[in-house]
Amino acid sequence: MDVSDQPGKTGIRLVASLAGVSHMTVSRVLNGHTNIRPATRQRVLDVISELNFTPSTAARALATHRSRQIGVVVESAVEYGPMSTIRAIEEAARDMGYTLTTATSHHGKLTPTQSVEHLLAQGVDALCMIAPRTSSLVALRQMSIAVPVLVIKSMADRTFLTAGVDQVLGTNLLVDHLAELGHRHILHIAGPLDWSDAQVRVRAFHARIRKLGLPKRPHVLGDWTADTGYAFASALTEMPEYTAIFAANDDLALGVMHGLHDRGIAVPGDVSVVGFDDLPTSRHLWPPLTTVEQDFTALGVKALEVLRSALESEVATRHVKIPSRLVVRESTAPPRPASL
Amino acid sequence: MDVSDQPGKTGIRLVASLAGVSHMTVSRVLNGHTNIRPATRQRVLDVISELNFTPSTAARALATHRSRQIGVVVESAVEYGPMSTIRAIEEAARDMGYTLTTATSHHGKLTPTQSVEHLLAQGVDALCMIAPRTSSLVALRQMSIAVPVLVIKSMADRTFLTAGVDQVLGTNLLVDHLAELGHRHILHIAGPLDWSDAQVRVRAFHARIRKLGLPKRPHVLGDWTADTGYAFASALTEMPEYTAIFAANDDLALGVMHGLHDRGIAVPGDVSVVGFDDLPTSRHLWPPLTTVEQDFTALGVKALEVLRSALESEVATRHVKIPSRLVVRESTAPPRPASL
DNA sequence: GCAAAGTTTGTTAGCGCTCACAAATAGACG
DNA sequence: CGTCTATTTGTGAGCGCTAACAAACTTTGC
C-alpha cells in the first residue's frame, strides 16, 4: 500500500481512501467516538499505524477552538519547588492529552501580566500560575481572562482555582517540634512577603507561638536566598537571645547556618535551625537540616485534576490542599540549659 | 466603532472591513510585509489595537505548516543546570517569536524516543535536547527527524547541531588549580558515564593529569547526587592516600564533604574538594566550595542562535562552545606536608 | 502623453480538521 | 416481508489564516 496510490490527498483523507471509508469516519476513530463498527475501526487503525499517521494539532485546534495547551507562568527561575511542580504538572497534563507552554517572568524581563497575555495569545485552554507574588495576583484579577486559571498557593481564593501544600500545617509541625524540644524563644526569618507562601508562614508562625503561650517576638524579613540568610547570621555580634531559628525555606536556613558558623555559634548546640522544603541536598548540609517536606509531585497531580474538572465544566472542586510532613534531622536539639 | 457593525466577520476579516481594506492587507501588516503604504498600515494597526486583536496561532500554523514552537526534551527533572538552560532558551525563543513545549522523560516514565515522538506529533518546528544521555542520542540517530535538532552538549556532533559549556576547559582549570596548590594525588568521582558531560570530564581529567605528569589514579564512578557522594566518603575507613577530590558536580561534592566530615577528615585540612556547576548555594556550604561556573544563560542564548540559523536555513553554525570559569573558595588548600 | 515598469491592494483557493446534518444500512417487530 | 427505529457512515461547509496570482494604481522615461 503506497502513499502515492492516492495522489492529492493528505492527512485524514489519505487514511480514509486507503481504508475505503470517508474522512469523517477516520476523524471519528481518531476521537474515540462510539458507534463505529469494530471492523471499520480496525481497518482505519491499521492504515493509521501503517502510515504512521499523526493528525495535525493545528488543524484540530482551528476547527475545535481548543489548543489542548496549558499555559504556565513562573516567577522564580530555577528553584526546586516550582520546578518540581511544573514537572509534575507537565506529566499529569500529558496524561490527559494536554501540552505545557511556559512563560517565565523573572527579573522584570516580562511582567506577569505580559506573560499571561503572551500565553493567551498562544491560545492556551487554561492558565496555571506557579506560586505567584500576591501583587501579580492583584494584577491578574483585573484582567478578565476567558479561560480557567489555577493558582498554586496554599489558601483558597474567590477568583481563582487553587492548589497548594498546607503551609499552616508545615509551620505548626516545625514550631511544635521546637517547642517540644524546650525552645521558648524562636526567631522566624520570613521569605519576601509579596509571596503568598511566605505570608502564610509568617502568620501561621505567630499564631502558633501565641497558641503555645511562647513569648512573642517579631520576625525578620528576608528573601528566599541563601545569601540573605548568610548576611543576616554573619552580622550577629553576640550570642542571640533566641535559641532557635525558623527560616522560611531551606536555602535561607543553609545561609543562616553558614553565617552562624562564621560567628562561632554552634548549630544545634547554641541555636537550632529549621527550614522548609526538604531539598534533596538538605540532608547533606552540616548539620543535616530539620525541615518540612512538600510533596510537589502530588501537588502537580492534584492541581491538574482541579483544572481538568474546570475544563470539562463539571462541578468543579475549587481548591485542594496537600499535607506536608516534618523531617527531623540534626540541626535541632534542646536549648542549652544556660540560655533558658 | 462597534464589533457588531460587521456581523459574521471574525478575526482578520473583521479588522479588514473595519479598516476599509481587504483581509489580505491585514495579513500583510501582521506579518510585517513591506510594500504597504504607511497610511494604510497605520489604519490597520489602529483597528487592531482598538479591537485588541490577536491573530490565531492555530490558523497561522495550519496555513504555513510552521507552529513556531520548539520542543524541549529534558531527562533530569529539576536540576539547576538543565533548568537554567531551559529558562534561558525560553527567553531567547520568545524574543524570536517562538514558544517552548517541554517533555520530561525521567524515571523511565517516558523514554526519550517517546518524548521526541510526542513533541513531533505536536508539530514542533525544532527540537532541543537538554544534556541527554549518550544512549538517548544513539536512539535519536535512528529516528530520521524532519526538523532541526539541537543538542546541549560540549562536544560537536556529526548528526546534530550542538551547543555546550566547555567542559574540558572547566576540568583543566580545576586540575590546574589543585596542582598549583601542590596536590599530586587527586581522585575524580565521575558522574554517570551515560551522560556526555560526565564522560568528557573523566577524559579531560585523565588527560590533564597525564599532561601535568601527576601520578595516574583510576576514577570512581558515581551519579549526580549528593547521596552518592555521601555514601562514598562516609565509607572511608582510614585517611585516604589522595589529598584532593574532584567531584563531577557540586551536589556530589556536597555529599562528599558531608561524608568526610562524618569520618573526621577535615576539608580542606586533610583533603581538598572541588565541584562543578557553581550552584547558587555552593558558596554557603561548609566550607564554601571551590568549583567551576557554567554560564547557562549565555548557553541558552547561543543555542537558540544556532537553532535560528538552522530554521532560517542560513549557512548554519553547527556548534558553539561557552567558556567556563574557575571559582576558588575555601574547600581547597595546599596538602598537609605530612602526606606529601 | 503614453507604454513599460514598479508599487500597492484585492481575489480565490486551500491548509487538515470537526461540526451539523443527511443518507444508508442494520435490527426489531407485527 | 414491509415498516419503523437505531445504528453506522457520508456530505458539505467552514474554522482563521496565508500563498499565489490578478488587478488596480503609481511612477518613470522618451
Image (cartoon, coloured by chain):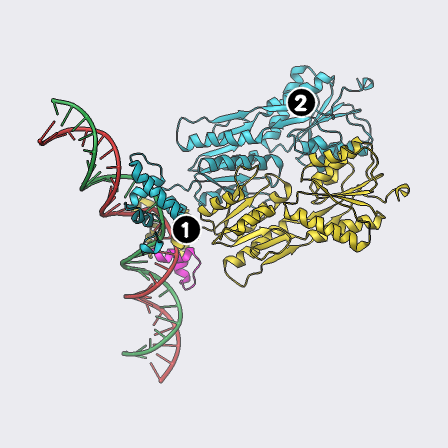
Chain colours: A yellow, B cyan, C red, D green
In the image, what residue type sits under mark 2?
A: Leu
**Mark 2 falls within which chain?**
B
- Callout 1: helix, strand or loop? helix
- Chain ID, mark 1: A
Q: CA distance from mark 2 to mark 1?
A: 52 Å
Whole-percent x, y for residue A262 in the image: 79, 30
Q: Nearer the viewer, mark 2 or mark 1?
A: 1
Highlighted magenta segment, given as a residue range: A23-41
Classify the position of the C terminus of chain B by image quarter.
top right
Residue A335, horizontal then vertical, whole percent: 86, 43
**x, y percentage for residue B175?**
67, 21
Label 2 sits on a secondary structure element that is: helix
Q: Is residue A99 above or below residue B134?
A: below
Circle 2 packing at 10 Å, graded few (<14), some (14-19), many (20+), is many
Q: Quadrant of residue A30?
A: bottom left
- Does residue B38 belong to the magenta stretch? no
Residue A27 lies in the magenta stretch: yes
The amino acid beneath tag 1 is: Ala
Residue B166 location, quadrant? top right
Mark 1 sits on what residue?
A: A61
Numbered badge on residue A157 = none
Q: Please give left or right for residue B29 compared with residue A111 in the image.
A: left
Dominant secondary structure, magenta: helix
Task: Please say whether residue B55 is visible from this viewpoint.
Answer: no
Left or right of B4, for residue A211: right
- Residue B104 percent coordinates (x, y): 56, 43
Discs 2 and 1 carry the same chain letter: no
Number of residues whose C-alpha sits closer than 10 Å to that of mark 1, classed few (under 14), some (14–19) or many (20 or more): many
A149 over B189 or under it: above or below: below
Disc 2 + disc 1, Cβ < 8 Å:
no
Q: Is residue B324 visible?
A: yes
In the picture, the disc for residue B174 is 2
